[in-house]
Amino acid sequence: MPHVLTLVAPPSGAPVLTADLARDLATHLPDVGEPVWLDPGFAVDIPFVASREIDDRRLANSLRIDLGDTPVDLFIQPSAFRRKRLFLADMDSTMIGQECIDELADFVGKKAEVAEITERTMRGELVFETSLRARVALLAGLDAGVVERVLSERIKLTPGGATLVRTMKANGAYAALVSGGFTLFTNPVADMIGFDENRANTLLIENGKFSGKVAEPILGREAKFESLVDLRAARRLVKEETMAVGDGANDLAMIKEAGLGVAYHAKPAVAAAAMARVDHGDLTALLFAQGYRRSEFVAA
């Protein structure tokens, strides 16, 4: 079966991806073709043909060992259906660099407490729905107007995210932001990046202040999975035509169900379970993984 190994170096700094490095890694692959440079010095495809079914994840892990400390991400996948037609993404610590609930908690002096719960939840140590209710309860009485300050002063888009979404949409893909966070943030963030739709939880507000409660049912791990399945079915796509990215435990079901499921700078357990991962680069790595050349990127 035709496969491709894609190597991607971080876009900033000196290029570390050399022809020699690509050639060395190619020696571990069967029936290798000529490399195709998607961005000289930063991204290259190495096609190969597997005569029998291979374990893409095991082979990728083996190649990461060979890379050692070299900051290069890699993807191994079948050549068919590389350019995805449906993209689902987590928001917090994926499409943006922050956890919104942690930033809200800072305004009531409880950021450290909430951030610790968030971290444990993302590692899979706590049940997401129970954890979210507990964290939201700590926001009771906070003026809802603080959301504007958080958005303008603290929320930063993850590098490459807008380029990723806009390039995929320009090539016919549908993009959905699916978050365990809150619509107060996903609505503006989705607009800034260019998502077609967003799904998230609703913080309840009474007299202009957070009530300390979140609308039920809570959008968590299963709801993210169901969003992928529903959006895929609505567009009559096969699994291989979909991609999902996230960083936490509540993203895992969605990541595993996608044709290309990516752990982005993720918690260790999530990175280990995902089919693909980005440990070094930014979100444009997901364009190279689909075979896009740098010249095809749609600038943000």
Image (spheres, rainbow, N blue to C red):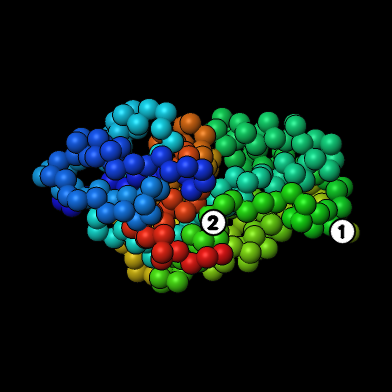
Helix, strand or loop at label 2? It is: helix
Identified by mark 1, the residue type is Gly
Residue 242, horizontal then vertical, whole percent: 38, 58
Residue at screen point 38% across, 47% down: 41
Which badge, 1 or 2, comes first in the chain's sequence? 2
Q: Residue furthest left?
A: 51
Q: On residue 161, which mark appears?
A: 2
- Mark 1: give few (<14), some (14-19) or many (20+) Cα within 10 Å: few
| Separation of residues labelled 1 and 2 (CA atoms) | 32 Å
Residue 295, horizontal then vertical, whole percent: 41, 64
Any part of residue 276 in sight: no
Residue 271, horizontal then vertical, whole percent: 44, 36
Q: On residue 33, which mark appears?
A: none
Q: Nearer the viewer, residue 293 or 104?
A: 293
**Image position of 111 (left or right of 36):** right
**Image position of 107 (left or right of 283):** right
Residue at screen point 74% across, 49% down: 154
Residue at screen point 35% across, 69% down: 236
Mark 1, residue position: 208
Identified by mark 2, the residue type is Gly
Q: Quadrant of residue 203?
A: bottom right
Question: Is residue 241 depicted above or below 249 in this figure?
Answer: below
Residue at screen point 45% across, 64% down: 297
Any part of residue 134 in sight: yes
Residue 90, horizontal then vertical, whole percent: 54, 51
- Mark 2: give few (<14), some (14-19) or many (20+) Cα within 10 Å: many
Helix, strand or loop at label 1? It is: loop
Q: Nearer the viewer, residue 63 or 276?
A: 63
Question: Badges 1 and 2: C-beta atoms under 8 Å apart?
Answer: no
Q: Nearer the viewer, residue 217 or 294?
A: 294
Q: Nearer the viewer, residue 153 or 148?
A: 153
